[in-house]
Amino acid sequence: MNECTFHPKIEGKVLKDKIDPKTSIKGYNEMVNRYRSASREKMLINENIEKSACGANYLNTRDQKVKPFNLSSRKVKDVKYKIVEITLKPGKTVSMKLLETDDVNTLAKKFADTYQLSTEHREVLEVNIEKELKILKSQKT
């Protein structure tokens, strides 16, 4: 048992079949082209990010004066206001701040859009807001 008894019969040279993936795999060329184009696009995006991060924003804004933040689009200091509680459904109420300079239609429309109210409810809301604004304007400070 120490000697090997296997002796294969090999006739001539054995040639391995070389498989060309370009011809044997369906869609190979399209896949390779897709990967190459994605790689090129990624490199371009990375180059643009690196270029813009080199202080372009600083150079554009360094000569501008510093402005304080404007956290409110409307000035509330000199304007009278009233906070109104609106009940949407039992158990759910919403507070709304009414300013005497507010427009009834736009305020009711924004509120109705925010809380998905129907047009009938919006019209009722307009009437109630108008009443509250009349009361607010008639009050003395």
Image: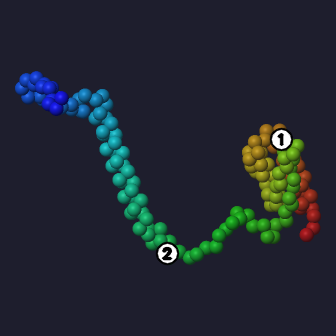
**Vertical arrangement, residue 126 with respect to residue 57, above or below:** above
Residue of label 1: 121
Asked whether, in this view, residue 134 is left or right of residue 122, the answer is right
Residue 35 lies, with reference to residue 136, above or below; the image says above
**Which numbered circle lies on residue 104?**
none
What is the crowding at mark 1: few (fewer than 14 residues within 10 Å), some, or many (at least 20)?
A: few
- Residue at the location (50% across, 76% down)? 63
Q: Residue at x 82, y 66 (%)?
A: 79
Residue 118 at x, y percent in the picture: 79, 39
Marking on residue 62: 2
Please count the marks in the image.
2
* Residue 16 seen: no
* Between 54 and 31, the one nearer to me in the picture: 31
* Name of the residue lying farthest toward the front: 1
Disc 1 to disc 2, C-alpha distance: 51 Å
Mark 2 is surrounded, within 10 Å at the Cα level, by few (under 14), some (14 to 19) or many (20 or more) other residues, namely: few
Residue type for callout 2: Arg
Along the line of sight, the residue nearer the viewer: 47 or 141: 47
Task: Report the amino acid beneath label 1.
Answer: His
Residue 85 coordinates in the image, percent (x, y): 87, 53
Q: Is residue 99 left or right of residue 70?
A: right
Mark found first going from the N terminus, 1 or 2: 2
Residue 139 makes an appearance in the image: yes
Q: Which corner quadrant of the image does residue 45 belong to?
A: bottom left
Cβ atoms under marks 1 and 2 closer than 8 Å: no
Please state the horizontal and vertical placement of residue 92, each as a whole percent of the image: 84, 47
* Residue at far left of view: 12
Q: Horizontal placement of 66 versus 14: left or right? A: right
| Quadrant of the snapshot with the C terminus | bottom right
> Which of the 4 image quadrants contains residue 28?
top left
